[in-house]
Each structure stands twice: as structure tokens, then as C-alpha cells.
Amino acid sequence: TRRALRGRKSRSDATGVARCDGRRLMGVVLVGCGFSYVMENARRKAEEVAERLRPAQQPDLVIGSDTVVELDGAILEKPQSEGQAFQMLSNLSGRTHKVHSGVALYTKAAGAEPARVFCETTMVTFATLSPDMIWA
């Protein structure tokens, strides 16, 4: 069975920014945004591969991973355009943000549940970027 995580989930808007809003994402509520968001994405990626390969072709280990940037409580999704990329880099310029990397490990021994799901968070500080540097 799947275990629901308590807290807030993230939802992306047209700008590529996901905000915590307390709603459910496919039946799972995520805790505190970034770290839970990437752990859940990593778990779903690994689970999808493990289920697709089950039972005949399943390897001993399936690894799922996801990485996102979080700035001021907002998850910055992959930009969908050059304009969004410019805006994202402008927002990060001269500031410190979090980079969350989530990993899920599925093993034959663990069966349908992940053997381990974890997240590492790194604080990253950007230099101040001029518009010319961003567009280069």
C-alpha cells in the first residue's frame, strides 16, 4: 500500500514556479515542499519502472531520482521558454537557494515498496548576474 505524506504539496503554474498550497497531488499530500516533492517524484519514477519490468525482467535494483530548486518556498520547475529561463536566473542572481535531490531505491527483496527513499539538500549561492551574462 502507498503511504500518504502529511503536509503541503507543490503545484506548478504557468511561470514554471510550483507553490505549496495544501492540495493533494495524485492522492498524496507532500510535506514542506521541496524535499518531499523530490522524494515523491523519485519514488514514482522508480515505482513506474519497477512495475513495468515486474516480474520477469525486474533487475535487482531500480533507482529513481529527481532534483529541483527551491527559492523563497517556491519550487522552480524546468523553464518552458527562454523568457522563463531568463526570469528564473534573474531571480536566483546574487541569492542563496536550496537544491533538493531525491532518490528512491527499489529492490527485489523489498517487493512493491521502496527499500529506501531519501533527499539531500544543498544550499547554493549564485553570483550576481547581469542581463548580458544571463542571455550569453
Image: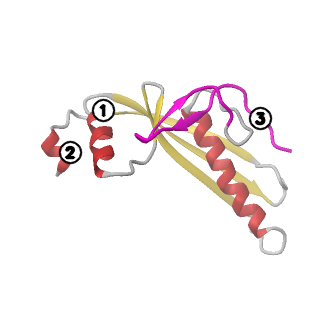
- Looking at the image, which residue sits at the far bottom? 56
Quarter residue 76 falls in: top left
Q: Which residue is mark 2?
A: 134
Q: In x, y percent, where is residue 57?
A: 78, 74
Q: Inspect the image, locate mark 2, and give the three-letter code of the amino acid beneath it.
A: Ile
What's the distance in space between the residues labelled 1 and 3, CA to CA? 33 Å
Q: Residue at x 76, y 49 (%)?
A: 114
Q: Is residue 112 above or below residue 90?
A: below
Q: Which residue is mark 3?
A: 4
| Left/right of residue 91 with respect to residue 57 in the rendered view | left
Q: Is residue 73 above or below residue 122?
A: above
Residue range corresponding to the magenta coloring: 1-24
Looking at the rendered structure, the secondary structure element under dot 1 is helix
Labelled disc at residue 91 = 1
**Quadrant of the frame with the N terminus:** top right
Labelled disc at residue 79 = none
